[in-house]
Image: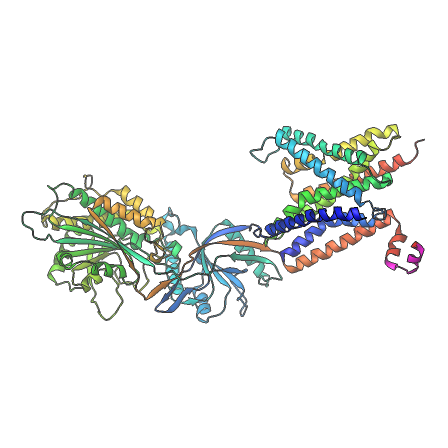
């Protein structure tokens, strides 16, 4: 029953994206075009990142944590942020509210991320006879990733699209955005240097994504209120 | 509108080609092998052969069943289970009952201990070693004489497979044998079905060392030294036959080397020709030896004064046996026996004589010398075995590996044979001369013996699976040609009584599979998670009313929207 397992893991990995789209008002305002454009921008960003990684990074001999390499990877990770900036500000969206814009962009971004990073391993690996927990963890990671991307898109729209922000909140916004952008480096540090097992890493990702989502939600709500 | 359609038509071609590429990619991707297993183990199949049309051995090669381990509940249905049996704790009576009652079984996997592969250092395990030897020989004799309509494999124990076995035992202890609904381990061997080996060949290698032809053209007499080099065992890929008859082959090669040194200079060349024969087809009533002898022309056959056949001379302490078919009072036999005893006394060992009459009507040939006797050539067999082995017994089985051979025993056998042959050739019986003395240039070379013994102990040599130009045959031929003048290969086919099937080795994949219940539970959990997520999102973004309205679908809604 291995195709069954593949089906299970696939709905765990990609289901939430579809559910998010249909459950929230995004589907009523037909923002699928925005999501598709965001996905294409993500594809372009990933290609640029790949070229940079191939040019600047050395192939590691062993699987240990090399701080210099990880720093370089984090810097290249900021290209992600640049891509998100491009998707949020430069693309032409039909007149949808800012609220929905960042959700649609975040959703498209996260969906493209899941498909590109997780579909191929799932197809090749989950159909075998051998049973591992690996793909279920991967699905949970995809869920956490969705939440993270939505938070990052929200903070991005706050940073670049909203002009009148309360002065006191600006550094917090930038700090949270920084944390979100470097989240991949943090998880790889946990996995390699501290040697955490997959369940622990996935739990950390889930917890941190929920926490960051809550913080971003509060920041967003705070910026909605007219500054007195 | 029309413009759009025309653009769409051109785009249709592109879309069509995209679809075909996509379909191709999907097909390629679907052909990806099922993912790699947790464990992959080398396994060796039980031999499959027909004897006069009656099938024996394991008749199937492909395996795809769940694993199970003893003890089983009585009456358990094992027809879709592969039973893993470690040989160390084997209960032979249970196995015998199971086999003779012809109960269906998914497959058998025997786990052999690593001790028989590597030389065990201590002699303190001798009791275990003796017990293991008897278990293995009994198991072998049981398996090769029955017809098993399911795959039977042998594997060496290692950590991975021991872990799997422990897991299976734990799972079975809860009372549920592993099936598709309960999960467990699945053993998969994917090989094509075995086919009959078409016209298997046996190859005899002979080397001729001519003696010194003096004045006069009288034919020189010949002495022959013969050993059969092929083996037969329950697992043909593991039948290295170090003692039976690797020790005989090594002894023959060393004797050839020593005599080639003696014969290299005309001053020391004897007035006897020496004929060295490495024959094949030993386990099958010495079929190859018979065909080899039939190929001789009559003059050569009549010139053979006597032949010494070597069979298993690698693990004896101080007693060897000389087996003869002519009565011991026969003049020639007496001569040979006395020359052997004389040298044996000097070496401090004893040689006994055993007489077994030949029954011409019985096709069973227990010793190689009997083939010589059937064509009226005097011959003896020198062996550590005191009793004639039955058909397919003592032919190099599971237990017969490098660690049961004692090199010093081979050295003593070489000295015994070489010295008694040389004294007969040079006519110095009774005189106190040692030709192959230790520390002389004609001493037995221990490293030569060791290296050839190690090589033979790594090479399985079951004749039907050796092709005409197999590397071991070429190696033996080259070695004999280094020591003798003329080397001939003779290719024959095994007599019609035996036919063999291929597929002797395969890779076993062990997968840990989850039960169907687990998959269903997971589906249920995921479904409820997605529904919860959906409800949560609807409630937080649109409000609870929207959620309830979604399920009510009052017809008035449509009128409202319009």
Residue B80: quarter of image:
bottom right
From the top left corner, tell me how far across and down residue A196 is, in percent: 65, 40
Q: Say which residue appears at 50% left-offset and 54% top-offset.
A: B508
Q: Quadrant of the C terminus of chain B?
A: bottom right
Q: Say which residue appears at 75% left-offset and 47% top-offset.
A: B6
From the top left corner, tell me how far across and down residue A47 is, in percent: 67, 36
Of residues B86 and B206, the one drawn nearer to the viewer in this rendering: B206
Of residues B84 and A222, the one drawn nearer to the viewer in this rendering: A222
Residue B99: quarter of image:
bottom left
Q: Looking at the image, is B390 positioned above or below residue B401?
A: below
Q: How is the image coloured?
A: rainbow
Residue B367: quarter of image:
bottom left
From the top left corner, tell me how far across and down residue B495 is, in percent: 30, 64
Q: Which residues are magenta?
A: B551-560
Residue B232 visible here: yes
From the top left corner, tell me how far across and down residue B372 is, in percent: 19, 61
Q: Looking at the image, is B109 positioned above or below residue B470?
A: below
- Total labels: the figure holds 0
Q: Given the current orientation, which residue lies at the most extreme left position? A: B216
Left or right of B549, for residue B328: left
Residue A148 visible here: no
Please say whether residue B558 is one of the residues in the magenta stretch.
Answer: yes
Of residues B141 and A122, the one drawn nearer to the viewer in this rendering: A122
Please say whether residue B66 is one of the residues in the magenta stretch.
Answer: no
Left or right of A167, for residue B91: left
Principal secondary structure, stretch drawn in magenta: helix
Of residues B381 and B23, the one drawn nearer to the viewer in this rendering: B23
């Amino acid at each position: 029953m291995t195709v069954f397992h593949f089906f299970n893991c696939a709905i765990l990995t990609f289901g939430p994206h579809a559910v998010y789209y249909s459950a929230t008002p995004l589907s009523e305002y037909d923002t699928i075009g925005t999501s598709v454009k965001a996905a294409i921008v993500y594809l372009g960003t990933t290609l640029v990142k790949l070229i940079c990684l191939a040019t600047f990074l050395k192939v590691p001999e062993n699987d240990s944590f090399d701080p210099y390499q990880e720093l370089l990877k984090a810097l290249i990770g900021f290209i992600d942020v640049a891509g998100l900036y491009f998707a949020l500000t430069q693309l032409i969206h039909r007149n949808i509210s800012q609220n929905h814009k960042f959700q649609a962009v975040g959703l498209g971004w996260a969906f493209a991320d899941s498909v590109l990073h997780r579909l191929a391993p799932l197809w090749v690996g989950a159909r075998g006879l051998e049973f591992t927990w690996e793909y279920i963890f991967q699905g949970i990671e995809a869920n956490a990733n969705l939440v993270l991307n939505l938070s990052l898109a929200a903070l991005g729209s706050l940073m670049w699209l909203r002009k009148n922000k309360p002065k006191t909140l600006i550094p917090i916004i930038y700090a949270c955005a920084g944390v979100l952008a470097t989240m991949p480096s943090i998880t790889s540090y946990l996995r390699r240097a501290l040697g955490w097992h997959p369940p622990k890493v996935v739990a950390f990702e889930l917890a941190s994504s929920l926490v960051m989502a809550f913080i971003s939600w509060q920041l967003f709500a705070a910026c909605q209120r007219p500054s007195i | 509108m029309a413009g759009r359609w025309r653009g769409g038509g051109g785009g249709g071609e592109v879309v069509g080609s995209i679809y075909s590429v996509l379909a191709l990619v999907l097909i390629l991707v679907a052909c990806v092998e099922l993912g790699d297993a947790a464990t992959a183990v080398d396994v060796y199949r039980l031999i499959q052969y027909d004897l006069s049309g009656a099938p024996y051995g394991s008749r199937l090669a492909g395996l795809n069943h769940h694993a199970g381990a003893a003890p089983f509940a009585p009456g358990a249905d094992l027809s879709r289970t592969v039973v893993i049996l470690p040989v160390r704790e084997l209960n032979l009576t249970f196995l015998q009952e199971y086999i003779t009652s012809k109960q269906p079984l998914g497959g058998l996997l025997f786990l052999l201990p690593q001790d028989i592969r590597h030389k065990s250092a201590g002699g303190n395990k001798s009791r275990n070693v003796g017990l293991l030897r008897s278990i293995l020989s009994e198991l072998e004799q049981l398996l090769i004489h029955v017809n098993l309509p399911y795959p039977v494999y042998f594997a060496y124990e290692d950590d991975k497979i021991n872990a799997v076995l422990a897991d299976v035992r734990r799972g079975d202890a809860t009372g549920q044998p592993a099936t598709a609904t309960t999960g467990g381990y699945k053993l998969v061997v994917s090989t094509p079905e075995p086919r009959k080996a078409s016209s298997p060949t046996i190859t005899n290698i002979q080397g001729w060392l001519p003696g010194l032809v003096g004045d006069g053209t009288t034919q020189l007499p010949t002495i022959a030294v013969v050993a059969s080099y092929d083996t037969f065992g329950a697992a043909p890929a593991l039948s290295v036959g170090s003692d039976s008859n690797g020790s005989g082959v090594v002894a023959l090669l060393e004797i050839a080397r020593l005599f080639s040194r003696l014969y290299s200079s005309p001053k020391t060349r004897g007035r006897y020709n020496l004929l060295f024969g490495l024959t094949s087809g030993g386990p099958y009533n010495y079929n190859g030896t018979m065909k080899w002898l039939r190929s001789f022309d009559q003059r050569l056959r009549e010139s053979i004064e006597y032949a010494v056949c070597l069979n298993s001379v690698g693990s004896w302490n101080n007693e060897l046996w000389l087996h003869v078919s002519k009565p011991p009072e026969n003049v020639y036999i007496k001569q040979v026996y006395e020359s052997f005893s004389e040298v044996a006394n000097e070496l401090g060992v004893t040689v006994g004589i055993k007489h077994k009459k030949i029954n011409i009507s019985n096709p069973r040939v227990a010793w190689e010398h009997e083939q010589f006797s059937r064509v009226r050539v005097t011959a003896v067999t020198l062996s550590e075995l005191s009793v004639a082995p039955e058909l397919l017994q003592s032919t190099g089985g599971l237990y017969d590996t490098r660690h049961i051979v004692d090199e010093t025993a081979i050295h003593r056998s070489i000295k015994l044979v070489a010295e008694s042959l040389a004294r007969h050739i040079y006519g110095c019986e009774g005189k106190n001369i040692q030709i192959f003395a230790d520390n002389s240039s004609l001493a037995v070379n221990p490293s030569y013996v060791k290296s050839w013994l190690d090589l033979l102990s790594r090479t399985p040599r079951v004749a039907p699976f050796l092709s005409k130009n197999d590397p071991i045959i070429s190696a033996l031929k080259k070695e004999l040609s280094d020591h003798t003048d003329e080397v001939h290969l003779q290719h024959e086919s095994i007599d019609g009584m035996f036919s063999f099937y291929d597929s002797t080795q395969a890779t076993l994949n062990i997968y840990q599979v989850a039960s169907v219940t687990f998959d269903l539970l997971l589906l249920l959990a995921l479904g409820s998670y997605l529904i919860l997520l959906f409800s949560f999102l609807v409630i937080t973004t649109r409000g609870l009313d929207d959620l309830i309205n979604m399920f009510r679908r009052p017809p008035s809604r449509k009128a409202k929207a319009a």
